[in-house]
Amino acid sequence: MKALWIRRGLATGLGVVVLAATGYVALQYRDGAATPAPEPAAGEPLVGDPSALVNSAPPSLVPSAPAPSAVSALPSPSKSVKPSPTKAAKPGTGGFPGAHNTGVPAGTNLSRYSGPCTVTKSNTVVSGKTIDCDPFLINAKNVVIRRSLVKGTLTTTEATGYSFTLEDSEVAAGMWQGPAVLSTNMTIRRSNIHGGQTSVSCYANCDIRDSWLHGQLLKDGTEWHLGGFLANDTGGSGRSNVTLIHNTIVCDAATNSAGGGCSGNVNLFPDFGPVSGILIRNNYLGASPHVSYCLYGGSEENKQFNDGVRDIVVEDNVFERGANKKCGGYGPVTSFNTKLPGNRWANNIWSDGKPVPPAN
């Protein structure tokens, strides 16, 4: 059996679909008990009843309410034990992005957008609108979408100079086998992005800050691989050029019976190019028993473009413990190689304040 990674290059509103096949690994069950199979191939979601992986009920994730579940309190230390580390701020409490501080600001009056669903005029500004376009295609430079609701996908065409800024807005992509927002030369600020197979997919040159990526949708009977953020190319320039700063990112869709589900919150895969030039700083990576790892770090020996992966910096991020205390079903991170040129892992912590080491 094969599972599929999907990439869409938009030359028109319909787009082109490219499939990348990967080996398939599942959890095996006997008499109602779960026996973990070998760790998944890159991007493979967990399969089966995820509750068998943890000792308690799945946590309440960020998208289900403005405030996520509280982190389990550590036992009070005795006099012979050092005090417990200070716990990190949580989404929904003012520390990280969530329902309370992303999307269209409260009190904003939205009117219906009557412009074209394909924007071709550079420097266009769309503000205070409900945009019923799927896709809302940006074929122009320096387009701004501000304080607006996009009911559909928001895209640019790959390998072009087209660009857009999305700020204080919401993208509700609905159910489809592709990203809610993609693909090139995008700047995102304080936005609430949900729906689709992946919240944001970056072909190249993407700067995302203070935003909430969550609420992916999985169709019954499909083997879709979901994620919060995906970078798996270099835009033809040799570098991915990705910045993720102070976001809340979680892949929270439940696994289905066909083997579809979440790969990771942040997925860096050298599928179509050697991912490089990536900064991941001060983000909150939410826990889910349905996700394999909370972070795939870019180095996969079985990937075509593994050679050349470099300059990936992961620092000052918070990994939520979750019910199984591991963030994801298998752990917090995999495939991050600290020995590659320019790669750096520093000051990443669990939500209880303890350090998270890199995985190689």
Image: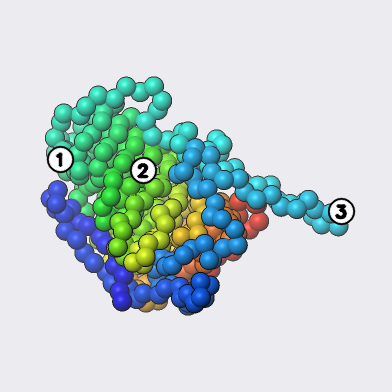
Residue type, numbered disc 3: Lys
Q: Which residue type does callout 1 highlight?
A: Thr
Query: Circle 1: is it few (<14), some (14-19), or many (20+) Cα within 10 Å?
Result: some
Question: Which of the labelled discs sits on residue 118, or is there none?
Answer: 1
- What residue do we see at 42% from left, 67% from top? 47
Name the side, left or right, on which 42 lies relative to 146: right
Query: Is residue 58 toward the left or the right of residue 207 in the image?
Result: right
Look at the image and tell me whether residue 134 can be seen: yes
Nearer the observer, disc 1 or disc 2? 2
Helix, strand or loop at label 1? It is strand
* Residue placed under numbered mark 2 in the picture: 193
Q: Is residue 356 visible?
A: no
Residue appearing at x 49%, y 77% in the figure: 30
Q: Position of residue 116 (x, y in %)?
A: 14, 35
**Disc 3 target residue:** 79
Please provide percent x and percent y for residue 149.
30, 34
Distance, label 1 to label 3, CA atoms, is 65 Å
Location of residue 187 (image quadrant): top left
Which of pointers 1 and 3 lies earlier in the amino acid sequence? Answer: 3
Question: Looking at this view, is 281 or 182 the one in front?
Answer: 182
Residue at screen point 46% across, 65% down? 49
Amino acid carrying label 2: it is Ile
Q: Which mark is residue 262?
A: none
Q: How crowded is the residue under tag 3: few (<14 C-alpha within 10 Å), some, or many (20+)?
A: few
Q: Who comes first in sequence, dot 1 or dot 2?
A: 1
